[in-house]
Image (cartoon, helix red, strand yellow):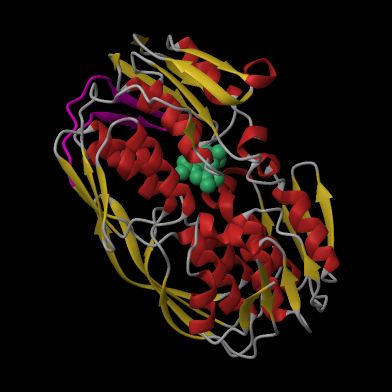
């Protein structure tokens, strides 16, 4: 499917975005390992989270999906069953990495694969610590790539220091730590999103945090609960950017997750000079949420780097678009992880924004974006990457003439309803061939 975008004259309205992807995945995983029912509202019905549901059903967990809730019948820490077939995670890095942590603690064999993007993504980062804990894991490419074969069992607690700030790696180790006796600890170079820690506590596990180290105590008795998933700030980010760069715009996005490990995009928008306001804040199971309002703004280029990067890791494609529309230079550094996401997001954004008339240099660990050039519509590649497709759609709204984005069905990975939400605020967008 192609996405066809014309220039937007004005964006206006009050919208919501689908549930947070990270929290949705974790609600199924912890719900499956808990005792009793976990009832999730606001669950993201995107392809990635549906892959997690499918994998846990294959592990013997009853999961009921209704239009407004997901109900997970917990089986306790030791209640998963050996799957009769290969588990397919689709496009979902969170599913394969976090699930591997859980499977490392199971006294049976499991096999995991995913789509062509997943089979290129680095897995040594989870294979190494999980092997140290006692799991036997085999992967392609000398144990670095999926498909993976996992023979789990008796795990021992470890204290592990990671080279990268990755919530997926941290969470895989913490989830494996649930099956080991004693405290399992992970130390990261920077703090990464802490949804696993927050939800583990809510389900009744003991979790300790000090500086950049997180520890979980093994063999807890988790108890099913009601989870309300806030809107995904990473999905809201496309609308925040669109509202800031399109003329005469005024948008409110309601019920967005505002966990401080995720709000780097708000700090970036503020630093760039955007008119942004947060209201009606509240707490949902330890996760803050609120309504965000954004208006058309004159943006200035800034530098984005260091410990800010993990707090906006998924927003870098759309920050590149903001940079192209700002005055001056926007430089993104310390973002080499972007090369091993669903696509190489640094080269994807550099090549596609250049096609639209921007001036961008790709750096070894980021992008240098020279702002202030008028963008022109173009035929763009999405690289089958949901966030590249949506970031380019936002660029298309301020480009002169029509922009066409190829393979835009990838958007369903994290944001089913993206096109309808854009239309609801007056954006001239449609699906085509
Ligand atoms: C996620 C962590 C991040 C992020 C991904 C979701 C998670 O990945 O990019 O979209 O849910 O833990 P890394 O941990 O690899 O940085």
Q: Position of residue 300 (x, y in %)?
A: 69, 71
Residue furthest front as drawn: 84
* Residue 244, quarter of picture: bottom right
Please provide the residue range marked out in magenta: 205-225
Question: What is the x, y in percent for residue 209?
Answer: 34, 32
The number of numbered discs placed on residues in the rendered structure image is: 0
128 in relation to 277, above or below: above
Q: Is residue 212 visible?
A: no
Residue 400 part of the magenta segment: no
* Residue 281 located left or right of residue 376: left
Query: Which one is nearer the viewer's eye here, 155 or 279?
Result: 155
Left-right relation of 256 to 424: left
Q: Quadrant of residue 377?
A: bottom right
Task: Look at the image and say whether residue 213 sits in the magenta stretch.
Answer: yes
Closer to the camera in the image, 136 or 334: 136
Residue at left 17%, top 40%?
224
Q: Is residue 421 left or right of 247 when viewed as pictured?
A: left
Task: Judge by depth and name the residue closer to the eye, 19 or 66.
Answer: 66
The residue drawn where x is 36% and y is 13% is 157
- Can I make out residue 44 in this image? yes
Left or right, 237 with respect to 193, comes to: right
The image position of residue 85, as x and y in percent, is 44, 27
Residue occupying the point 25% across, 56% down: 284
- At 31% from the left edge and 42% from the top edge, which residue is drawn? 28
In the rendered image, residue 408, in percent from the top left (x then y), is placed at: 64, 63
Above or below, 374 relative to 383: below
Q: Residue furthest left?
A: 36
The quarter in which the C terminus is drawn is: bottom right
């Amino acid at each position: 499917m192609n996405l066809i975008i014309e220039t937007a004259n004005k964006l206006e309205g009050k919208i919501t975005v689908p549930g947070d992807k990270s929290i949705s995945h974790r609600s199924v995983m912890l719900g499956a390992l808990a005792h009793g029912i976990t009832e999730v509202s606001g669950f993201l019905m995107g392809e990635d989270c549906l892959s997690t549901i499918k994998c846990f059903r294959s592990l013997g967990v009853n999961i009921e999906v209704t239009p407004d809730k997901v109900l997970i019948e917990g089986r306790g820490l030791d209640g998963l069953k050996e799957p009769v077939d290969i588990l397919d995670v689709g496009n979902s890095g969170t599913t394969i990495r976090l699930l591997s942590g859980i499977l490392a603690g199971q006294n049976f064999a499991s096999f995991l694969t995913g789509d062509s993007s997943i089979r290129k993504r680095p897995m040594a980062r989870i294979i190494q610590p999980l092997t140290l804990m006692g799991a036997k894991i085999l992967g392609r490419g000398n144990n670095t790539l999926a498909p993976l074969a996992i023979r789990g069992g008796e795990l021992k607690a470890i204290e592990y220091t990671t080279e990268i700030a990755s919530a997926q790696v941290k969470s895989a180790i913490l989830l494996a730590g649930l099956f080991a006796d004693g405290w399992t600890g992970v130390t990261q170079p920077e703090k990464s999103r802490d949804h696993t820690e927050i939800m583990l506590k809510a389900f009744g596990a003991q979790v300790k945090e000090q500086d950049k180290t997180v520890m979980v105590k093994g063999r807890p008795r988790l108890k099913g609960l009601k989870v309300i998933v806030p809107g995904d700030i990473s999905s809201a980010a496309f609308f925040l950017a669109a509202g800031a760069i399109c003329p005469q715009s005024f948008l409110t996005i309601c019920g967005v997750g505002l966990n401080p490990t995720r709000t780097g995009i708000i700090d970036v928008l503020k630093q760039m000079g955007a008119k942004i306001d947060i209201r009606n804040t509240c707490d949902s199971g330890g996760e803050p949420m609120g309504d965000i309002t954004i208006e058309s703004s004159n943006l200035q280029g800034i530098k984005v780097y260091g410990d800010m990067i993990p707090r906006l890791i998924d927003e870098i494609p759309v920050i590149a678009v903001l940079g192209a529309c700002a005055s001056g230079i926007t430089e993104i550094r310390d973002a080499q992880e972007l090369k091993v996401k669903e696509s190489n997001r640094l080269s994807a954004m550099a090549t596609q924004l250049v096609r639209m008339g921007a001036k961008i240099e790709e750096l070894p660990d980021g992008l240098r974006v020279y702002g202030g050039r008028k963008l022109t519509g173009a035929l763009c590649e999405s690289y089958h990457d949901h966030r590249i497709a949506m970031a380019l759609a936002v660029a298309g709204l301020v480009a002169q003439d029509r922009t066409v984005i190829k393979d835009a069905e990838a958007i369903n990975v994290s944001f089913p309803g993206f096109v309808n939400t854009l239309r609801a605020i007056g954006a001239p967008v449609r699906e085509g061939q």
